[in-house]
Image (cartoon, helix red, strand yellow):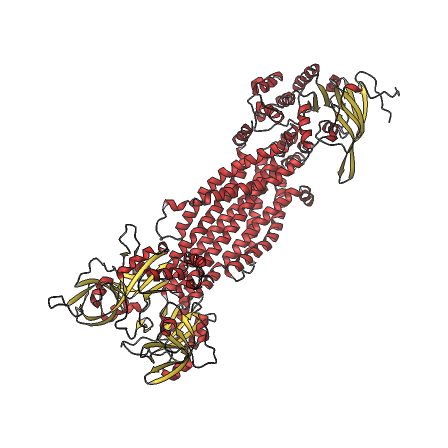
């Protein structure tokens, strides 16, 4: 009979249930959407903040001082230490490997030569990865300078690393340099290779201009070529001077600034296992021999700041959504029960105990909460995915499996249950407390 | 009669009042935060440092030890053109040699200005303004200095001894430099400031406007935005703005519908009163007017209380998250009032229309 | 005419006995005494009609007898059990065992069919028995309308469902508050016949009515006025109580 009561109540009282159900649906949709956004906002903002460039720099620990003014090497260091390009795949082996979203090694060189038109060329150049696979794995990180410098504006095409040979390569010219030398896409710069190992070895190297890039800083006065070509030109096979790394980090706090080697083992474990920029840099130092790694404070600190603020805002708004939804559901439930006071009075007069009446109403509430809550979860997840895609457009398609966040489901449904039951309790208690005669008489 | 009507069904009225208050409070809080959002976010981006750089046009010869200097009054003009809330710092660079013979870049600057401009600099201790020979050593440069307390440098035959007050750590080019007070720098090297870094607050539009003014004030000088900062900031602020807009709509909708539900249920409960008054000769319009009036009174009361609570909530949220207050905005009030009045009107008019179809006699008989 | 008549008739078979029962309500205008020192006995198997103008306390009396309300003072015994001594749960149980209600307003659960409404009373008492419920509906002449919802039944049919429900647990006492107040003449006749049938089967019927025709069916009339009780037997001359 109990189940019969339950079923008939749902089957034949659809209009009344609709109101309460709608409130629960909307409430859970709002809460799910906000929570889904708040939890994924970190990823999205990090991608957005990638526009500021790398937040960690790796350089040889035995390096000499850079003598740079305005980014231009005034007295370029001759000799000096290098990192091995072949060591870079080791980055995939560090603890926080999955947080690394970009790697861009650099090798600064000097190009002396002439254009086909005869203009003398004496320019700084940098060997870079443009679109390079970090390791030989199937789902490796495809990265390079292009991904790490989204503010670079290119006319033409980026150089292909695969077309670089021992005697030729593609290159891209900075806009200022191109203007100064009168270079256009399709032009060639002829330069010499370093002293040959044998008389039969090739002497010349051709750089084919495939694009003109505008960077907004001093890179506009440089040539950009593939890393392997740069290594060939400099006579430094496999060498890398500096690596820029972009990693998803946890904003720095007091704990992050501690020196891990001074911490007790358990604390050190915790420090190590948190994705602070400092700990990722520490892990990079461990992984790549002869390397020193630092957070680029200008980017990291500010990124951390902005991320903390925005995600903080999202969480606070989620809390507000939770409150609003909680109120909405409680109010709807209270109203729904209030409308049925007559039924409660009648059942009391028929000899029903307070407990059994309460059970019936709570069962109805529970069922409604679970169904409407579940539906709200689905709607909310979809809404969050749509909203995220619309706002952060251009960040790549959202995979289906990232739309639904499994852990949110029990959380949201449980919340809906708790709030619905809490909302209906005062009304149920009030109705049960009243003398049935008063209820029945009031309706009469 | 209105007062009696409200007081008689006290529980109903209170729940309706609470509903109106909550909707007004939520609307106020969200709208207040939303209005302030751009300003707050732009303020956060200040920590990225300079977004505009002024330099003298570069000389074509490479390998020179110094950069061309800016006019002497450049800084004053910059302050004027960029605006009162802009931060600016001047820098002059020269390449000196240490007592070990290593080349090192020495930069002259105004430490107070730099401290405000570049908040990400991690500095052990800033040189006090009174000390003319204090220096800040970049952490990598410090490795090439024998004695940090007596830093001996040589520029074009002129020696200079400084004492290092602290180390500087940035992860960038600054780590390889030694920073000294501008007066000492110029006196020693004869080099004048060549770069002014400026931080202009606000979005892309404001920065553009500032750059235009700067170019007018400083003809012949190169005024460039730090492209990734300006573009990046605009994008992020726009996207967060859109995100918040979506959230506000969603929450507002939720609250509005639930308030609507609460209120209309309350009106439906009064159907017997409605039927009675109709039987006594009240017209549809009169009755609708009565219900509407009641709902409006509740809406108004709800708005007043809700505005106070909502503004307080916005203030608290802003304080907790942005560490600055979000002051209550009276401009939000009309919108909140409109919203509440709309909900109240819909909540009272819609059920009345439904009731219109019912026969008073049937209602009074108790069906 | 002025002879005081002893109230107690066959006290040892009294199934409902009131002794100085008073019910007061505290309202805005002060204390309202709905029932004032009522004292009488109803014997098993009696059909008593409670009459009086509106506001005389009839419904209050019915609610008290039906254990839906508590007296402010005085002693109320049903089946020799003082209702004041029972806890709320015991009272619930007692009520469903002993008393069947027939209200003026047809209080039916709107989303349950006639059959399910009758089964509801079974459910809260002991166990549901669909066959019995159907039989009860047959008895009131609604066997064919068992699956209909209250909204699909006429006023008279709804009242008959209420009667079927009141009877389902075979309670010895039937409390009827204006059972035909909302019915037309034809339905009134049906309900009256039902009540007569029940009375002949030995049920004690306490009926509130101001319909003189219905009142005439009863064995005894208890008249109320301003909360005070007057008793007189059916067919006899009016006797005023000594007060």
Q: Quadrant of the N terminus of chain B?
A: top right
Position above or below: C215 against A232: above
Report whether B77 appears left or right of A361: left
Q: Position of residue C134 (x, y in %)?
A: 58, 19
Camera-side residue of B342 and B317:
B317
Q: Position of residue C120 (x, y in %)?
A: 60, 26
Point out residue C203 in the picture as x, y percentages from the top left corner: 70, 18
Residue drawn at (47%, 46%) of the image:
A32
Instruction: Pick whichever, C5 or A77, lies toward us.
Output: A77
Residue B209 visible to an observer of this rendering = yes
The residue drawn where x is 38% and y is 56% is A47
Dividing the picture into quarters, in which one does residue B106 lie? bottom left
Asked where in the image residue B29 lies, by quadrant, the reply is bottom right
Q: How many marks?
A: 0
Q: Is residue B16 above or below residue A45?
A: above
Task: Name the image quarter holding residue A164.
Answer: bottom left
Compared across the picture, whether A124 is left or right of A305 comes to left
Nearest the viewer among A326 and C143 is: A326
In the orientation shown, which residue stands out farthest toward the left?
A200
The quarter in which the C terminus of chain B is drawn is: top right
Q: Is residue A278 above or below residue B76?
A: above
Q: Residue at x 71, y 27 (%)?
A: C66
The spot of residue A122 in percent (x, y) is 22, 72
* Whether residue A185 can be seen here: no
């Amino acid at each position: 009979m109990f189940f019969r009561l339950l079923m008939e109540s749902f089957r034949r009282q659809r209009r009344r249930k609709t109101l309460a159900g709608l409130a629960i649906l909307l409430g859970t949709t709002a809460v799910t959407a906000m929570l889904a956004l708040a939890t994924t906002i970190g990823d999205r903002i990090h991608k957005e903040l990638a526009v500021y460039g790398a937040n960690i720099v790796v350089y040889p620990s035995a390096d000499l001082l850079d003598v740079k003014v305005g980014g231009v090497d005034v007295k370029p260091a001759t000799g000096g230490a290098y990192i091995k390009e072949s060591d870079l795949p080791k980055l995939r082996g560090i603890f926080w490997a999955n947080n690394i979203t970009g790697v861009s090694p650099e090798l600064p060189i000097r190009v002396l030569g002439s254009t086909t038109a005869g203009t003398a060329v004496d320019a700084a150049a940098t060997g870079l990865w443009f679109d390079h696979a970090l390791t030989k794995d199937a789902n490796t990180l495809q990265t390079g300078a292009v991904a790490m410098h989204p503010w670079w504006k290119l006319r033409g095409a980026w150089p292909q690393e695969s077309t670089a040979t021992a005697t030729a390569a593609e290159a891209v010219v900075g806009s200022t340099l191109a203007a100064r030398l009168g270079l256009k896409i399709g032009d060639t710069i002829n330069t010499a290779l370093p002293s040959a190992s044998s008389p039969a070895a090739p002497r010349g190297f051709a750089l084919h201009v495939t694009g003109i890039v505008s960077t907004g800083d001093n890179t506009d006065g440089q040539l950009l070529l593939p890393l392997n070509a740069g290594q060939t030109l400099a006579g430094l096979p496999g060498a890398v001077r500096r690596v820029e790394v972009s990693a998803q980090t946890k904003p720095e706090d007091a704990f992050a600034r501690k020196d891990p080697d001074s911490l007790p083992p358990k604390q050190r474990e915790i420090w190590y296992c948190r994705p602070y920029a400092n700990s990722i840099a520490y892990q990079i130092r461990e992984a790549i021999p002869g390397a020193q790694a630092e957070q680029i404070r200008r980017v990291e600190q500010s990124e951390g700041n902005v991320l903390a603020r925005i995600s903080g805002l999202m969480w606070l708004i989620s809390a507000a959504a939770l409150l609003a939804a909680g109120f909405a559901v409680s109010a709807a439930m209270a109203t729904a029960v209030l409308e049925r006071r007559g039924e409660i009075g009648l059942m009391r007069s028929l000899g029903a105990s307070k407990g059994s009446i309460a059970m019936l109403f709570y069962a109805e509430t529970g069922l409604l909460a679970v169904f409407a809550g579940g539906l709200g979860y689905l709607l909310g997840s979809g809404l969050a995915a749509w909203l995220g895609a619309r706002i952060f457009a251009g960040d790549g398609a959202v995979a289906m499996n990232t739309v639904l966040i499994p852990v949110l489901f029990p959380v949201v449904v449980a919340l809906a249950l708790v709030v619905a039951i809490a909302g209906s309790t005062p009304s149920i208690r009030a109705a049960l407390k009243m003398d049935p005669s008063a209820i029945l008489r009031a309706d009469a | 009669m209105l007062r009696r009507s409200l007081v008689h069904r006290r529980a109903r009225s209170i729940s309706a009042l609470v509903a109106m208050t909550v909707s007004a409070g939520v609307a106020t809080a969200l709208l207040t935060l939303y209005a302030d959002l751009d300003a707050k976010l732009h303020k956060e981006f200040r920590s990225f440092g300079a977004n505009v750089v002024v330099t003298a046009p570069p000389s074509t010869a490479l390998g020179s030890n110094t950069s061309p200097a800016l006019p002497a009054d450049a800084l004053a003009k910059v302050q004027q053109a960029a605006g009162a809330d802009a931060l600016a710092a001047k820098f002059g660079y020269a390449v000196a040699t240490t007592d070990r013979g290593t080349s090192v870049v020495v930069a002259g600057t105004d430490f107070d200005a730099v401290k405000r401009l570049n908040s990400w600099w991690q500095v052990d201790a800033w040189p006090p303004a009174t000390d003319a020979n204090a220096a800040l050593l970049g952490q990598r440069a410090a490795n090439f200095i024998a004695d940090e307390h007596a830093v001996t440098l040589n520029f074009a035959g002129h020696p200079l001894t400084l004492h290092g007050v602290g180390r500087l750590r940035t992860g960038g080019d600054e780590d390889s430099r030694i920073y000294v007070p501008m007066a000492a720098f110029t006196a020693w090297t004869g080099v004048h400031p060549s770069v002014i870094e400026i931080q202009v607050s606000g979005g892309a539009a404001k920065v553009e406007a500032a750059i235009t003014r700067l170019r007018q004030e400083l003809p012949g000088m190169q005024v460039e935005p730090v492209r990734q900062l300006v573009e990046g900031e605009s994008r992020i602020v726009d996207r967060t703005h859109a995100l918040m807009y979506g959230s506000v709509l969603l929450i507002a909708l939720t609250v509005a519908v639930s308030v609507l539900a609460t209120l209309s249920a309350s009106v439906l409960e009064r159907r017997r009163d409605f039927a009675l008054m109709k039987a006594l000769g009240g017209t549809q319009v009169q009755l609708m007017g009565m219900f509407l009036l009641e709902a409006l009174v509740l809406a108004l009361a709800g708005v007043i209380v809700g505005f106070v609570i909502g503004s307080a909530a916005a203030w608290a949220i802003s304080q907790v998250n942005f560490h600055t207050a979000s002051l209550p905005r009276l401009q939000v009030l009309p919108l909140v009032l409109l919203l509440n009045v709309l909900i109240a009107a819909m909540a009272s008019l819609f059920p009345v229309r439904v009731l219109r179809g019912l026969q008073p006699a049937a209602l009074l008989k108790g069906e | 005419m002025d002879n005081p008549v002893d109230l107690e008739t066959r006290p040892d078979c009294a199934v409902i006995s009131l002794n100085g029962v008073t019910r007061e309500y505290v309202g805005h205008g002060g204390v309202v005494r709905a029932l004032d020192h009522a004292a009488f006995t109803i014997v098993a198997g009696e059909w008593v009609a409670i009459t009086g103008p509106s506001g005389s306390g009839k419904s209050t009396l019915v609610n008290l007898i039906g254990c839906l309300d508590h007296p402010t003072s005085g002693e109320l015994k049903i089946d020799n059990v003082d209702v004041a001594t029972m806890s709320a749960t015991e009272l619930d149980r007692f009520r469903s065992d002993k008393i069947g209600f027939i209200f003026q307003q047809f209080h039916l659960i709107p989303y349950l069919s006639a059959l399910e409404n009758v089964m509801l009373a079974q459910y809260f008492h002991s166990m549901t028995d669909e066959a019995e419920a159907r039989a009860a509906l047959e008895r009131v002449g609604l066997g064919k309308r068992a699956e209909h919802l209250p909204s699909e039944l006429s006023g008279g049919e709804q009242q008959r469902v209420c009667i079927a429900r009141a009877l389902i647990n075979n309670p010895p006492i039937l409390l009827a508050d204006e059972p035909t107040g909302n019915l037309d003449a034809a339905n009134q006749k049906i309900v009256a016949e039902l009540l007569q049938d029940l009375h002949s089967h030995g049920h004690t019927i306490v009926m509130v009515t101001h319909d003189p025709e219905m009142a005439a069916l009863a064995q005894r009339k208890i008249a109320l006025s301003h909360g005070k009780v007057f008793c007189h037997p059916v067919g006899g001359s009016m006797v005023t109580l000594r007060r």
